[in-house]
Image: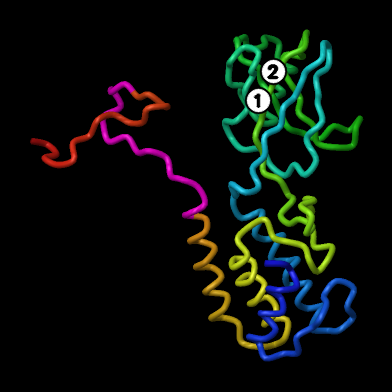
Amino acid sequence: MSLLTFCQDIARDAGTNVPATLVGNTDLTAIRLLTAAKNAGQFLFRKHNWSALIREHEITTAASTASYALPAGYHNYINDTAWDRSTYWQMRGSMSPHQWQILKSGLVQAAGLRKRFRVKWDTDNNARRVFIEPTPSSVETLVIEFVSQYWCSSSGGTPQTAWAADGDLPLLDPWLFECETKWRFLKSEGQPYAEEKLEAMDTLNLQIAQDAPADTLIMGDGSEEFDPFEGGVNIPDSGYGM
């Protein structure tokens, strides 16, 4: 469902004139619909680490190089996804400013087999970058996962951070986009919107709950061996405590 399609559906439901175009249209209804759709997109992609927006980024290190560029569209790092594939060790981070200064400025630096990293602003490059500690001394392969801020795309599939044409497509569920856009549009029109906002909240919570499978819960005292690839320990189907 394209931007124009779901916005036209909203206009019909609201009883307003239905614009033939949105982007570049100076009609007030078209402007309000486009603004509501833009605000909906900016809100939704920040609300959750959506599986549709999760990307993997590979870093190839170079000797004596401490910082590396983040990928295009990077918004935020996903915890516990940074790995050193050259040594098969998980990296520690992203370090807090406090932890980083202990590593970089302390008289006695913490030793360890694992690399540490921090995502922070690099004043030399005027951008956020990944800083590795200790500074790599050879070519190695590191990987992180992150949430992309490209929440929509062109009709041809080019990722975007904002609507640019009427045929653009949302990368999240179209019905969720329609619900979030609708109450915002009604509000801008001065119409009642409480019911529509509640529906959008319910839809959002349901989409978040269904976005990815939940983790396995281990029903035990923690002493049982757990295989992350095979799943949890054996729990009987009935007769608990017997």
**Span of residues in magenta:** 209-225
Tell me the tag on residue 99: 1
Residue at disc 2, secondary structure: helix
Q: Are discs 1 and 2 less than 8 Å apart at CB? A: yes
Amino acid type, residue under disc 1 in the picture: Gln
Q: Nearer the viewer, residue 74 or 4?
A: 4
Q: Is residue 221 magenta?
A: yes
Name the image quarter holding the N terminus: bottom right
Residue holding disc 2: 103
Identify the residue at the far left of this view: 242
Determine which quarter of the picture holds residue 176: bottom right
Amino acid carrying label 2: it is Leu
* Quadrant housing residue 70: top right
* Above or below for 76 versus 47: above
Numbered badge on residue 202: none
In the rendered image, residue 224 lying in the magenta stretch gets the answer: yes
**Position in image of residue 46 (x %, y %):** 66, 53
Residue drawn at 80 percent across, 51 percent down: 158
Direction from residue 34 to residue 11 in the image, left or right: left
Main SS, magenta region, reads: loop
Who's the residue at 52% across and 52% down the image? Answer: 211
Screen quadrant of the C terminus: top left
